[in-house]
Amino acid sequence: MIEDAYLKIGLSLLGALCAGGMIGLERSRRGRQAGFREHALVCLATCQLMLISIFDWKDGIPVAQAFDASAGRIIQGVMSGIGFLGAGGIIKEGFSVRGVTTAASIWTTASIGVLIGIGFYFPAMVTTLLTLTTLTLLRQWEERLHRRIELRLHLRQCRDGALHEPAILAIVKAHGFAASTVSAYGAGEGRFLDHDAILSTADETSSHRLIETLTNDTRFVEFGLAPLE
């Protein structure tokens, strides 16, 4: 029975890491800031907190127990406060967002502290090892992924002499972008023609070249280029 409890705890934590990692992998491949490691850490931390409602740790032995509502309220308060601390470390700089991995690791570290505080040493140790593996070894693997960056493009032109969709697609394609969901609509009581499109590229420098081109093209009254969240 004791061996079965240790096995269930270990498999639950490993399964949570894999499940969160697979979801985050899709996010990483699409160039999202919260990707593989962030999803894996959050899923792992949530799983180990739920183990508190399943097991009690008595004399170093995991024993099945009923859920303790009072412990749940304490944990909820602690993790909510830590969530605000982690969110304060997230900073957006231009096309990039920094601090998401740090916020996820802070939240995971807090959950490890909760487990150690109530004597759940084995799941705390397993989670610590899995977290270190995710932050170090898996970081190199994540950086080798074939990532694509997705951006939202907004263009505004004067109605007279405005470029239409084929010409606009040719411009973005020349800068290494693929475009999807292109839409056009009138604005400013018919004085302007606006185009919106979702662009994707594997080249991180493509956006800088496109911005320079749009800035120097006097046919565009204004434009916007922002990463998809």
Image: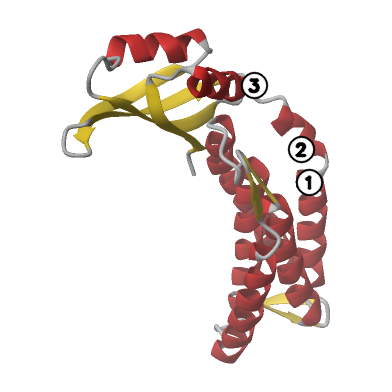
x and y percentages locating residue 180 in the rendered image: 35, 23
- Viewer-proximal residue among 165 and 69: 165
| Tag 2 residue | 139
Position of residue 156 in the picture relative to residue 89 (left or right): left
Instruction: Measure the C-alpha gap from mark 1 to mark 2.
Output: 6 Å
Q: Earlier in the sequence, mark 3 or mark 1?
A: 1
x and y percentages locating residue 113 in the rendered image: 78, 73
- Viewer-proximal residue among 160 and 102: 160
Amino acid type for the residue under numbered disc 2:
Arg
Q: Quadrant of residue 75?
A: bottom right
- Label of residue 135 in the image: 1
Name the quarter where the N terminus is drawn.
Answer: bottom right
Q: Mark 2: give few (<14), some (14-19) or many (20+) Cα within 10 Å.
A: few
Q: Are marks 1 and 2 in contact (CB under 8 Å)?
A: yes
Is residue 153 visible in the rendered image? The answer is no
- Label of residue 178 in the image: none
Instruction: Measure the C-alpha gap from mark 3 to mark 1.
Output: 26 Å
List the single residue furthest toward the bottom.
70
Instruction: Measure the C-alpha gap from mark 3 to mark 2.
Output: 22 Å
Could you tell me which residue is drawn at 62 percent across and 57 percent down?
42
Amino acid type for the residue under numbered disc 3:
Thr
Q: Earlier in the sequence, mark 3 or mark 2?
A: 2
Amino acid type for the residue under numbered disc 1:
Leu
Q: Is residue 205 positioned above or below 92 on the image?
A: above
| Tag 3 residue | 205
Position of residue 99 in the picture relative to residue 195 (left or right): right
